Amino acid sequence: MAQIEIKDVKKRYKTGVTAIYDLNLEIEKGEFVFIIGPTGCGKSTLIKMLYREEKPTAGSIFVGGLNVAKLRNGSVYKLRRKIGVVFQDFKLLSKATVYENIAFALEIFGLPKSEIHGKVIKVLDLVGLKHRAKNYPHQLSGGEQQRVAIARAIVNGPKILICDEPTGNLDPKTSSEIMDVLTAINQMGTTLIMVTHNRDIVERMKKRTILLDAGRLVKDFKEGTYESV
């Protein structure tokens, strides 16, 4: 079984809008996959269904063996332990330090402080921000804030990292640096799924690319075969 299996998935909102039509998709462990397409094509809906922010109207979604579509609300935490999520707008706690922002993601699982400290320092080192541990978000650049958000998302060792426009608010140089961090995380074995509008990044990275349009999978470019469309 693939790490992520999406079978005959449809998503229709209460407003009557259908965001996803009959989607079938498999993502293997350790893949790096871009999801692209015009605004309103269903990209965000798709990833929200992967971490159970939204439920499919029909079909099944298996993530790490869990049937997300049938997961009870009280069991969603089992899924969230498998998945880290990074957003465009960082979503950091403004009154908490860099260290505290990352540690909070572990405190909710009740880990002892000694274990939390070791994990936080390790991910801060990975994203190159050990020297910023005592700083607050407003003291950081946009790129540094996104690195903190990435560190927070991976500190619990998720098998899958989902990134929703992680470079959307960043300049080209900073975006490239963030992509280097994400590539390093992927090379450590984490499956990485990234929604983006940035075709330059997609063309440069040459990873598997899923193109959606009007809620339908239009093209599945295998790694290294993406061409601007």
Image (tube, rainbow, N blue to C red):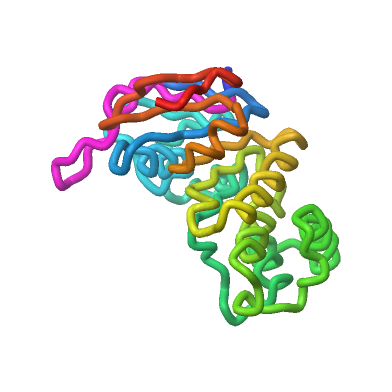
Percent across and percent down for residue 65 are: 56, 28
Percent across and percent down for residue 57 are: 27, 34
Predominant SS of the magenta segment: strand
Span highlighted in magenta in the image: 3-24
Q: Is residue 216 left or right of residue 207?
A: left
Residue visible at 65% across and 79% down? 139
**Quadrant including the C terminus:** top left
Q: Is residue 214 left or right of residue 187?
A: left
Q: Is residue 197 above or below residue 125?
A: above
Residue 8 within the segment the image draws in magenta: yes
- Residue farthest toward the left in the current orientation of the protein: 16
Q: Is residue 65 above or below residue 220?
A: below
Residue visible at 35% across and 42% down? 45
Residue visible at 60% across and 33% down? 204
Q: Residue 149 is drawn in which quadrant? A: bottom right
Q: Nearer the viewer, residue 110 or 20?
A: 20
- Residue farthest toward the bottom in the current orientation of the protein: 95
Q: Is residue 159 left or right of residue 166?
A: right
Q: Residue 218 is drawn in which quadrant? A: top left
